[in-house]
Image (tube, grey):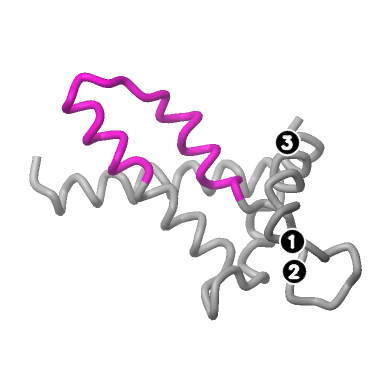
Amino acid sequence: MSDAVRAEKIAHEVDDAARQLAQAGRLDLTHEFIQHGDVTVYAHVISVARASLSFAECLGRAGISVDRASLLRGALLHDYFLYDWHDPDPSHRLHGFRHPFFAWRVPRKILS
């Protein structure tokens, strides 16, 4: 399989998973929040998910199996905290240290 075909297959897999999470929860809200510079949280997690699946395929070719569904879900939800951490709200203090816990807790409430 060519690299272009592989990348298209991965993009389709990520888009399908993102669509499912958007229907089950509020993943679409991540379009509203900026993560890095001018990149939205949504664009960031899509990029992370695609890179993760590409890496998983490399591992697969080396004989190492990866749970693709769990990897994909984790990549898409790793920054699922649903607030703008740039706001001067006191609850956003130490965002860089605390957001993994929010990203773990929020989907458990919404997607359970």
Q: Which amino acid does label 1 sit on?
A: His
Q: Which amino acid does label 2 sit on?
A: Trp
Q: Mark 2 points at which residue?
A: 85
In the image, 25 versus 40, the foreground residue is 40
Say above or below: 35 vs 52: below
Q: Which residue is drawn at 46% across and 55% down?
A: 46
Residue 87 image offset from top left, x and y in percent: 80, 76
Residue 43 in picture, x, y percent from top left: 49, 64
Asked whether the residues under the numbered discs 1 and 2 touch, taking CB atoms below 8 Å apart as contact, a structural biologist would say yes
* 13 sits to left or right of 89: left
At 53% from the left edge and 37% from the top edge, which residue is drawn?
73
Q: Label 3 belongs to which residue?
A: 111
Element under disc 3: helix
Q: Which is more foreground, mark 3 or mark 2?
A: 2
Which residues lie in the magenta part?
A: 52-78
Find disc 1 in the rendering and name its residue.
95
Position of residue 45 measured from the top left corner of the image (x, y, whole percent): 51, 55
Crowd band around label 2 with a 10 angstrom C-alpha radius: few (<14), some (14–19), many (20+): some
Magenta stretch: includes residue 67: yes
- Secondary structure under badge 2? loop
Q: What residue type is labelled 3?
A: Leu
Residue at image coords 51%, 44%: 75
Q: Which of marks 3 and 1 is in front?
A: 1
Q: Is 86 rendered above or below residue 110?
A: below
Residue depicted at x 25% and y 51%:
8
| Distance in Å between CA atoms under marks 3 and 1 | 23 Å
**Residue furthest right as drawn:** 90
| 82 shown above or below 73 | below
